Structure formats: structure tokens, C-alpha cells
Image: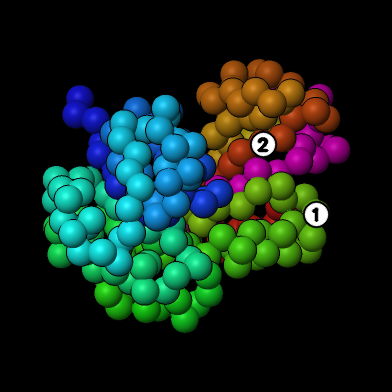
Amino acid sequence: MKRKSVVVFGLGKFGQSIATELAHGGAEVLAIDKKGELAHDVADIVDCAVSGDVCDTDTLNSLGISNMDAAVIAITENLDASVMATIYAKEAGVPYILAKAKDEIHGKILQKVGADKIIIPEHESGIRAARQIITGNILDFIELSKDIRIVEIKVRKEWIGHCLRDLDLRRKEKINVIAVRKDGQVTVNLPPDTPFDEQMTLIITVDKKDLPKIL
């Protein structure tokens, strides 16, 4: 199977973490940052780390990213640089561009110039924290689609000591348990006769309209 190839522009905390995770996941990663020390930090992790200014056309042209499968624009402190990197990746024919934005206006600008997906980490983490405060029972929350959510929830007290077969959660609660987390270990396809205990959390899929029932 061909390795996915990804170029990461910007090697701050976000850029370094995504470049590292991509490399560990088997992707071919080209990482670039204006600061040489940041490129040096990931040089032993990614396939190629480059020190260069993305606002410099010669630097961009030397990268040869036209055959990349994706680009990550992880630059937020310099609007011009993030816009330039996005436009360059788009014009080079990179099929998928994910861009980090510092706010909604920044995100809208990057979408206008070609970004396929915008993430605002601070905004998204704030929403997630608010949901956790409000619900209490929800530990994590991912929007899989417009209607479907992946949610990690605590095991209810009344479920402790009972198993999936007994509880019949798919029919009674309209939730589908896809994995169980305990002591940091995630188990998928939990045997239906395994009893739940209070140390477990459940990773489930649920329709948005049924979410209030599990809060």
C-alpha cells in the first residue's frame, strides 16, 4: 500500500504534534518552518524537515509538493504566510488542505483561498469543555456527521454488573457501543456477556436526536 504523503507548513506545538502523529502513523511527511530550530526538532521523526519562509516564492517552488496527498497549514501567527501556503498548495494540485485558524475570520479567509477543512483548536476545545460541564456524563464528543455523534460516556450506576446482552442498549437506549475504555486500554467488540464495572467508560455512536436521553 502506498504511503500517504503530507506536507506540514508551520511547526509550532500544533504543527509538530500533527507532523509527529502522521509520521508515527506511517505517512511520508515533509515539514517546513521559517525557524530552523523548529525544523530541527522534528528532523529525526519526519522524512524531510526544511527551514524556509513560505512567503518566499523560490522556497515554495523548491518543495515540489504537487504529488502530495494532503497539506496541513499550521501557521496562525502570520496571516500572509498561512494564506500563501494555502494558495500554493491549492495551485500545486494538493487534493486535501487542512488549515488551522486563530479565529473565524481567519478561517473564512483560508476557506476562500482553497482550504478544504478549517480547525480552530481553542474554539473547538472550548465547545467540548462546555458540553462536558453541562452534561457531566459525557467525557468526549466528536461530530461524525450532521446527525451522528461518537461519544465517550461514563457507565451508569444501574448498568454496573450487567452486560451488553442483558442491557440491550441498541434497542432500549438507541446507542451502539463500539468500544470500552478501562485503565487506559481500549477494547473493541466487547464480548456481549462481559459485565460493566465502574472503572469502564463506553465509546458509543448515537443519533443527535437521541443524545439528550443519555445525558
Would you place residue 84 above or below residue 34 in this image? below
Taking depth in this image into account, of 99 and 125 the one nearest to the observer is: 99
Q: Position of residue 210 (x, y in %)?
A: 61, 58
Check the image and name the residue furthest to the bottom. Answer: 105
Point 42% across, 65% down: residue: 118
> Seen in the image, is 53 located left or right of residue 190?
left
Task: State which quarter of the image contains the N terminus.
Answer: top left
The 10 Å Cα crowd at callout 2, few under 14, some 14 to 19, many 20 or more, is many
Res 30 label? none
- Compute the Cα span from label 1 to label 2: 14 Å
Element on which disc 1 rests = loop
Would you place residue 156 above or below residue 187 in this image? below
Magenta highlight range: 148-165
Q: Residue 61's image quarter? A: bottom left
> Seen in the image, is 199 located left or right of residue 207?
right
Q: Position of residue 186 (x, y in %)?
A: 61, 26
Do we see residue 18 in this rendering? no
Residue carrying label 1: 136
Residue carrying label 2: 202
Q: Residue 159's image quarter? A: top right
Q: Residue 25's image quarter? A: top left
Point 35% across, 47% down: residue: 51
> Seen in the image, is 88 located left or right of residue 151?
left
Residue kind at label 1, given as amino acid type: Gly
Q: Position of residue 93 (x, y in %)?
A: 14, 58
In terms of sequence position, does the residue under pointer 1 or pointer 2 come before the other?
1
Would you place residue 37 above or below residue 114 in this image? above
Residue 157: within the magenta?
yes
Point 76% across, 37% down: residue: 155
Would you place residue 167 above or below residue 175 in this image? above
The 10 Å Cα crowd at callout 1, few under 14, some 14 to 19, many 20 or more, is few
